[in-house]
Amino acid sequence: MTRFRNSACTSMMVGKKASIDGSTFISRNEDRVKAIEGKRFLVQPAVHGRDKTYVSPYNQLTVKLPTDGMRYTATPSADQSAGPNEEDGFNEANIGESATESVYANERVLGYDPFVKNGLAEDSMTTLVLPFIHSAREGVEYLGKLVAKYGSAEGNGVQFIDKDEVWYMEIATGHQWVAIRIPDDCYAVAANQIAIQQIDFKDPDNYMWAPNIQKFVANHQLNPDDDQWNFRHIFGTDTQKDRHYNTPRVWFAQRYLNPKAAAGQAPEDSEMPFIRKPERKISVEDIQYILGSHYNETRFDPLGNGTEEERKIYRSISLSRTAQSHILQVRNHATNDKKSNATANQWVEFGVPSFCPYVPFYANATDTDPSYRKLTPTMDWKSAFWLNEALATIVESHYEEYMEDDVAMKKELNAWARTKLAAVDEHVKGAGLTGSELTNYLTGVNHEIVSHYNQRIKQLIMKLLTDGASLSKLTFKMDPNL
């Protein structure tokens, strides 16, 4: 079975005490094989009394769906022939999911528990889980039951979020998985490699696992350590490809957030910790910077000044083939009402994260703007996907000349977003908006936000195209007398 559809992603999670404002975060770059993988941002309606069976177009996985399901947001692929690939979103209960981070198990464990050809794969994971869960913990439990029943078609890491907890689950083989609750005062970064380390089987509050995983490892003598039960050591890989494709991305993020503790780490260090306590509080702008980074200010930057070998030695975090990037945030500071449904924001980025802004959508909405909902097969100024792809292409074409303007625009939009969200919070509190009235109001706010971002991007594109007229290589010193 082909695995072309798997995402070569980078994920980042942040606990509520590690963030600057008490928010919980999950986030990911969805990287694909093709340079352009069309994406849309949709709201899928709630269903009640449904009698339906889901069949995956990718591998014919067949699942009888629950009768009722909540409304949820998603960023599906425009091409549905390989499955919906809905990837990420929030449901009505403010529970978020990001699926998936592709991970790879070693041949020892796969020899005893191979993947199931028509088992659960990335194309189906958000569709089959997000509408039916009411907490981050339940997300792990629900997905674990699906893996037990149908098996897994591939190795995947999946993130879940609610207002209090962030969970990361790694499915390594056909039926074996573990999950860890990210500590409130910590963050974690995963980069296409099994990342979870020690599992404490005496602490079910902070760890979860497949029912027979201990017996599976013991019966087949798979643990290489005498003194620990380390999921990464038992199930993971440690290869030359890992050290050039995967570990440098984790190194860069930890170098940025833990400059003192990570000072002795090298990009190819196979034993970097998965869970770290940051040396300072983390903001949404920090997450944007990491997901949009390409080893900035190091000799490994493909757009920098290192040698040709240094600039090409490691796979970057942000790529030209990043289909979309997202940051799911539950803003616990936004309201004094713990039951408020105005705190979940899905920051959506189309195009290349190095160059394009993140748009802060309220998840409690009934639809999305047509520029995000509709996608033509070729370039169209009315499409947010194509608008951002155009911006990225233009900025990279004259990186040194255009990057300053691009960075300034993104900072400007982040400042505008903070002001806008604060104003919306105050209005929601002051007006006492709840229920459908709140949902309708936030749906309208999303349209306002999109309008502002799209217009600002168009303004920058026109400025850069105008400036580009003086950057052509088809120039020469002109005779002023002609």
Image (spheres, rainbow, N blue to C red):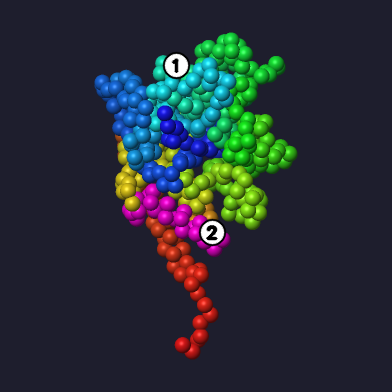
Q: CA distance from mark 1 to mark 2?
A: 49 Å
Residue drawn at 53 percent across, 45 percent down: 318
In this view, the residue in front, 88 or 105, is 105
Task: Give the tally of numbered discs.
Answer: 2
Say which quarter of the image contains residue 281: top right
Q: Describe residue 288's horizontal placement relative to residue 350 as left or right.
A: right
- Label disc, if present, on residue 148 of the rendered structure: 1
Q: Which residues are magenta?
A: 379-403
Work out whether 174 lies above or below 251.
Answer: above
> Of the residues shown, which amino acid type is indicated by label 2?
Tyr
Q: Is residue 356 visible?
A: yes
Q: Is residue 445 magenta?
A: no
Q: Are marks 1 and 2 in contact (CB under 8 Å)?
A: no
Mark toward the start of the polypeptide (1 vs 2): 1
Residue drawn at 45 percent across, 60 percent down: 460
Q: Is residue 390 magenta?
A: yes
Q: Is residue 412 visible?
A: no
Work out whether 59 lies above or below 42.
Answer: above
Reading the image, the residue beneath label 2 is 399
| SS for dot 1 | helix
| x and y percentages locating residue 419 in the rendered image | 47, 49
Q: Describe residue 74's horizontal placement relative to residue 307 as left or right.
A: left
Q: Quadrant of the N terminus?
A: top left
| SS for dot 2 | helix
Work out whether 475 lies above or below 234.
Answer: below
In this view, the residue in front, 219 or 387, is 219
